[in-house]
Image: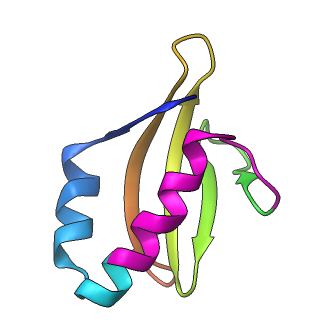
């Protein structure tokens, strides 16, 4: 089981979302506890981060395999997340 940690930027991103969308994204993030690289998760090119899709929103995160933790970096709309 992996622990989930949030950066301050990710917490701000989540608080800015509508409640319905926030619940949808958090449900997807929780799935990372059992298996941090499920089907659909992709490693970003030239970055240490991975991407998880949740509707029109993207969750960027890093995985610490030795410490068994997932660090959520950003949660943004797909138009804005890679800027």
Give the quadrant of residue 52. bottom right
Give the x, y percent position of residue 11: 21, 56
Question: In terms of depth relative to the viewer, which is nearer, 4 or 34?
Answer: 34
Q: In the picture provided, is 74 more to the left or to the right than 11?
A: right
- Front residue (pair 12, 45): 12
- For the point 78% across and 63% down, the residue is 40
Q: Which residue occupies the foreground of this view, 14 or 81?
A: 14
Q: Give the residue at x 40% y 65%.
A: 26
Q: Residue furthest top?
A: 66
Q: Quadrant of the C terminus?
A: bottom left
In the rendered structure, the answer to whether residue 23 lies left or right of residue 18 reads right
Q: Position of residue 72 (x, y in %)?
A: 41, 46
Q: Is residue 44 visible?
A: yes
How many marks overall?
Answer: 0
Task: Looking at the picture, tell me which residue is in the foreground, 24 or 73.
Answer: 24
Q: Position of residue 60 (x, y in %)?
A: 51, 55
Region in magenta: 23-39
Viewer can see residue 83: no
Q: Position of residue 69 (x, y in %)?
A: 49, 27
Is residue 82 found left or right of 4 in the rendered image? right
- Give the residue at x 58% y 28%: 1
Name which residue lies at 62% across and 41% down.
47
């Amino acid at each position: 089981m992996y622990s989930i940690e949030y950066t301050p930027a990710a917490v701000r991103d989540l608080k800015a979302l509508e409640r319905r969308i926030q619940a949808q994204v958090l449900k997807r993030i929780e799935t990372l506890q059992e298996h941090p690289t499920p089907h659909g998760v992709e490693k970003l090119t030239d970055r240490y981060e991975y991407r998880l899709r949740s509707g029109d929103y993207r969750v960027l995160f890093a995985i610490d395999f030795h410490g068994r933790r997932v660090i959520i970096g950003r949660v943004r709309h797909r138009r804005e997340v890679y800027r």
